[in-house]
Image: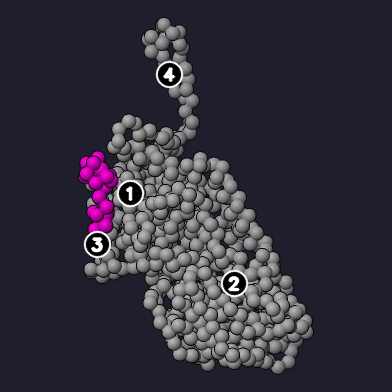
Amino acid sequence: MADYVVSHAEEGSVCAHNGEVKSEVWFKHGPLSASELCHIESVQLIAESHDQGFVDDRAAGNWTWFELCILDNAQATVPVTRGEILLTWESHQTSMGCGEYQKYQGHVFGPQHDLLRYLKEGDFIAVRLCARFEAWKLLARNGELRIGQSQDKIFRAEVDHRPALNAIISAHKFMSSIQSSVQPDKAAQPFPSLPTTLKTAMTFAPTEDRPLRVLSLDGGGVRGLASLKLLEQVMNHNHAGEKPCDVFDMIGGTSTGGLIAIMLGRLEMTVEECIKKYEDLMEEVFKGSTRWNYAWNGQFHDAKRLEEVIEGVIDEKLGSGIGKTSRLLNDNQKCKTFVTATLNEGGNNRGPVILRSYINTGASLEHRDITILQAARATTAAPGFFKPQTAGNDTLVDGGLVANNPVGWVWTEILGVFGATRPTDCFLSIGTGIDANSTLVQPGKYRVPLPSTLQSFVSVATNTEIMHILFQGLIDAFAPWAGKRKYWRLNVYKVIQEWYEKVEPRWFERNVLGRKDQVVHHSQDYEAIPKFNDPKEAKEKLMEMLEEYVQDVEVKESIKKCAEALGTKKRATAPDTGSCAIAPGTKNGVIAVRTEEVVV
């Protein structure tokens, strides 16, 4: 059977007006008969197109693209939904800021692609023009759907992504309900939402990309030093001296874990470099009288000093004099980095603000202009300890208040950026220490709170082990390759076993009140870890606890297995695609090719 072309010369266009995706069906082919379907072995869109002709901010991404979708009747204007999945896939993009027509060829959808597996008798293959965000516009003409045909009938098994989708949704609901039940309302941290693109077919598009490696870093002030030392233990097995940004595909962090994520991911430091800079930062920022600072500035520590130190680190890595102006967003970097922050207003009932170095096509472009310095300050702005950070119209504070263990948000970012079918080899979550059982300290009658009062509330609000407990089973069970271990958690602690104490009554209690000796049971506890703003204790006591922790047989085995999962090779560098920006869907195996590479 001969290949054929479905041509459409009429011009089409679509223009977006806000953050909602605007789409229009340009032309379609069908209805397809059963005899046609069994011989189609490929579908490819070729068309002339251009966008609005100008781009204010190229770093913010390309927001026009073509999709191929399935319609179930001639009058339909939106893709059909089957098994809760919207059946649409990206074909390709057009060049950014090009105001003249050029010819592009899109992705070749092969014989076993989901597009062809989902097609049924009577369906139409339609071409959609898509744009998002104000003023983005896509214009097209002279479209061609090239249909490749096989002489032999092609067998295609039915495809149904509902089990995978339902597993993710069910697990998400279950974990969310568990979290709500184990945390009191006032201390409960919001559970991460699933990406809005989860129910589109392109999210489940097959991929041959290698498995991901992901790093999640808790908050914890100066105790972040322990996180770096634990990461060093893992890296030293097969990647000694290498940069984590060359090993991990995504690094997400909160509070000082966010600062470390920026240093390792966005600034591309080695672990050794980061440890040195982090120790210098601790000594510089957390020195001086905390009570005097509070009385004078309303904060226990000087945010200006923190800014100066961070700015110096950025200058050193990226170039002198640009520490204040360098944007966090850099979508061309190999490793994707994000940090969490909290809205100062509404932080009690909203999830964290995600500040990204990359484009997540399923999220808004809010805070796309934030600088590295602003992001680092925002994620570390613990109330009472450092003043808040302004970004645009928002006032941001420490991300640890709602996501001190960001593992849940790392998971949803993976789904949103890489898709639900991209496997993961290693998901490493590192904490900053499990603290002793905590009792809330009441502020008392004085206006000025003591550091111990804030510390006690912080310890409850930033509990990281609950999120770890929720996600350790979820990631291993529901990520691709279910049942294979992919998740590791390292978090220093020292157990104090349960013990019994003989308590003797005082003279008056024994001889007048008649009280007798009692045996008091003390439950198992953990040894107290250093306060998050005590660098001396972090370098001494915490390092002693760390040395003991990594000698534990189970911990040694976890570090070894995690290192094995990371493999011996660096993460492959993405191929050079010029100035190509990836639009929604290409993350899931549908690769858009720029005009300068494939001009027909």
Q: Give, as a single range, the part of the protein colored magenta.
A: 288-309
Q: CA distance from mark 3 to mark 2?
A: 43 Å
Name the amino acid type tagged 2: Met
SS label for mark 4: strand
- Residue 543 visible in the current orientation: no
Judging by the rendered image, the residue that carries numbered circle 1 is 222
Query: Is 62 placed above or below 363 here?
Result: below
Of mark 3 and mark 4, the one earlier in the sequence is 3
| Residue 457, x across and y down, in percent | 40, 40
Answer with mark 2 or mark 1, whichever residue precedes in sequence: 2
Q: Earlier in the sequence, mark 1 or mark 4?
A: 1
Instruction: Please tell me which of labels 3 and 2 falls first in the chain.
Output: 2
Q: Nearer the viewer, mark 4 or mark 2?
A: 2
Q: What is the tally of numbered marks visible in this picture?
A: 4
| Numbered tag placed on residue 312 in the rendering | 3
Measuring from the top left, give residue 124's x and y in whole percent: 69, 80
The image quarter containing residue 479 is: bottom right
Q: Quadrant of residue 159?
A: bottom right
Using the numbered discs, state the Cα–Cα distance from disc 4 to disc 2 in whole angstroms.
Answer: 67 Å
Who comes first in sequence, dot 4 or dot 2? 2
Asked which secondary structure carries label 1, the reply is helix
Check disc 2 and report the residue beneath it: 202
Left or right side of 205 for 280? left
CA gap, disc 3 and disc 1: 19 Å
**Residue at numbered disc 4:** 503
Q: Secondary structure at mark 2?
A: helix
Q: Quadrant of the N terminus?
A: bottom right
N-terminal-most mark, 3 or 1: 1
Q: Give neighbour class at mark 3: few <14, some 14-19, many 20+ (Cα, 10 Å).
A: some
